[in-house]
Image (cartoon, rainbow, N blue to C red):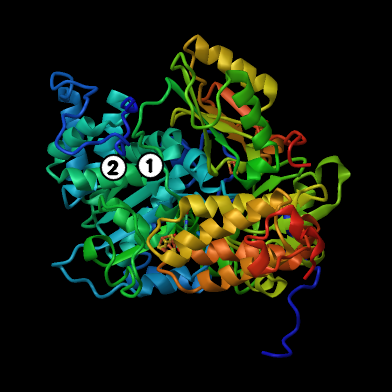
Amino acid sequence: MADAPSLITGETKAGDWRNYERVLLPPVKDLHKIDVYEENGGYSALKAIVEDGKFDPKGLTDEVKASGLRGRGGAGFATGLKWSFMPAVDPEKPRYLCCNGDESEPGTFKDRQIFEYNPHLMIEGIVLSCYAMTIKTCYLYIRGEYIDYVNHVQTAVDEAYASGYIGQKILGTDFSTEIVVHCGAGAYICGEETSLMESLEGERAYPRIKPPFPAQSGCWGMPTTINNVETLACVPLIVNRGAAWFAGIGPEKHPGPVLYGISGHVNKPGVYEFPTGMLITDLIEVAGGVRGGKNIKAIIPGGSSTPPLTWEMAREATMDAETLREAGSSMGTAGLCILDEDTDMVAFTRRIAHFYHHESCGQCTPCRDGTGWVEKLLSRIENGEGYTRDLELLLEICDQMEGRTVCALADAAAWPVRWGIRRFRDEFEARCKAESFVSSEMGDGASTETESITI
Amino acid sequence: MTQPFNGSLLRPDFVPGEPVERHFSDVELVWTDDEQKQIATFRSQYPTNDGAVMKVLWLAQNKFSWLPPEVVQFVADTIEVPYAKVYGVATFYTQYYKEKKGTYVLDVCTCFGCQVCGGYDILHYLEDKLGISKGETTADGLFTIQEVECLGACGSAPMLQVTNGPYVHNLTKEKVDALIDDLKEGKMPAFESVTLPQDETDLGGNRRSDTELVTEYQTPPVSETLH
Ligand SMILES: Cc1cc2nc3c(=O)[nH]c(=O)nc-3n(C[C@H](O)[C@H](O)[C@H](O)COP(=O)(O)O)c2cc1C
Ligand code: SF4
Ligand code: FES
């Protein structure tokens, strides 16, 4: 819509957030223990559904749809809608749920808090989701570096098995679901949904071409749904308190509680739970303001794949998908990184490029080679050896990476570079040598004799 | 002079048909009863044999400390899948060690969250302190330094991980010194629970009664290298 009113108003969309009561990580001591979780209403959503028949599977999916819950794993896809893509149950075909706890997006450290402090909420959410989609096996994929948390979650899963919340004939009913905890071994790409499935199958984790989408052909070629840890942890809350309650938190199109992981140059970094639609300035305020009272140069709103915003662009924006899109970035994983005025954006962008170069699985040429060239060019600019025309070359490489590969890693690698250069161009140019070279005479242009010839 | 065998699967001196130097004998390459039970559980968790490969590789690495070719072969035989497949998986992931590392592997995060909080300062400090560069192992075989990507602890940056195990958060040079001293005495750091800032008012800053070691997310030190 051409003349829709701007969403960047400088007003919060999180309502009365100062009196917000936390629900994903409520302030209860030892909530990770099953008895404490039960005392605080834990597993009541599961009981309400499997014992009292509060919702049938379709009803539960509709309730999640009505809640407006959107995925917290990065893409922000509507969860209820995703569930409804699962084909009708075919007794011949097993169906799978994958709970994505790979959490490797730089700047993101929120799922870890759920693993440590409220694992049973996630487990209850998994079992409820399995009920909604008539799934009998869930693979809970946790990154290998989180080995302490893998063991911690395994303890919680074992407790839940012992109490009859997972396993055969859950709570004495006909409904059965198993949860298998799977430990990764250090590969960012395994967070991509089809790569995660390859990893589970014991293959090298190369992402698959889509379509077919996981709902048609996922793990072992069977219908599969994949959701993030935090997404699934919202499900018991929706069952207990109703879709209307959930939809009423934060902005209409992207509601609910969110774990904001705030890092970088703030006085009190950490994970904060608030509604969606928080003003970025309010989040910085709760995170104690900027270290040393400095000015802010840039904000990464949701992990490394989300384009950096200048402070001008971010100061009136709120943390929800629509507003951030208008502001020129996206919500991603809600892992904010705050960068103060002293930050070297060239070094910063080069480090992001290094990350993607290291993590590219190598399947597609534009990604495998593109990420490498981007890193090389940025390193040379960082070292003061680059030329202004390298910036155009970088943008051209970005053009050739975006939308031309099997998975979105290549896009995620191109965006921070493209928008970093566009938005902080002065800083990049200041590091570049303006001189170019005359190709026929001067070879590779790197020699000092070329210094007097300008473009 | 040919290069000495460094144990890498991608050995530069590999000559097809020639015997490969082995690090573990057939006598060592056996599973205990307990491990066999675990393997049986792993195999029951996936619809195909291949599914168990990652878990059995982890089990093997924890037992043998790294994965030379004969261990990869051992894993392949255990779950009855081809060597090439297990090799493919082992080489895809960074946490599987394809060459011998030091007793303690120090994985220093320098990804951007840590970078802007002094991750490189910590890396360089460690390199100077131990007299090796990243990717190298000290002569006494005690320490290997590696530069790694985001470990999911950006709020407590800069940070590192010790040998695929515990995280050490909110690093300073003093903390690095203390860590190295402890490791030299064989003391691994204990699990450290990082508390939520919102719990400070509600729960006195700690929501777990079952952890010894608690730390807060802290304001990162001002980096020397980035500014
Ligand atoms: C390169 C890449 C890495 C990803 N890493 C993660 C991850 O670590 N955790 C996660 O939950 N989703 C990750 N995703 C998104 C998943 O593909 C998928 O969209 C998500 O798990 C779906 O869950 P949701 O609908 O609940 O958000 C990644 C996507 C890409 C393209
Ligand atoms: S885009 Fe990159 S990471 Fe994704 S499949 Fe292609 S090469 Fe692999
Ligand atoms: S950037 Fe170092 S832990 Fe995330």
Q: What residue appears at the point 59 percent right and 54 percent down from the top-left corner?
A: A376
In front of the other: A119 or A454: A454
Tag 1 near tag 2, CB within 8 Å: yes
Instruction: Tell me where residue A390 sits by quadrant.
Output: bottom right
Q: Quadrant of the N terminus of chain B?
A: top left
Mark sitting on residue A315: none
Q: Quadrant of residue B132?
A: top right
On-image quarter of the C terminus of chain B: top right
Q: Under tag 2, what secondary structure?
A: helix
Q: Nearer the viewer, residue B69 or A135?
A: B69
| Amino acid type of the residue that numbered disc 1 sits on in the rendered structure | Ala
Which residue is labeled 2 in the image? B54
Q: Residue at x 22, y 60 (%)?
A: A220
Considering only vertical position in the picture, is B84 above or below A394? above
Crowding near pointer 2: few (<14 within 10 Å), some, many (20+)?
many
> Circle 1 is placed at which residue position?
A185
Please name the residue shown 51% across and 48% down the image: A111
Name the amino acid, label 2.
Met
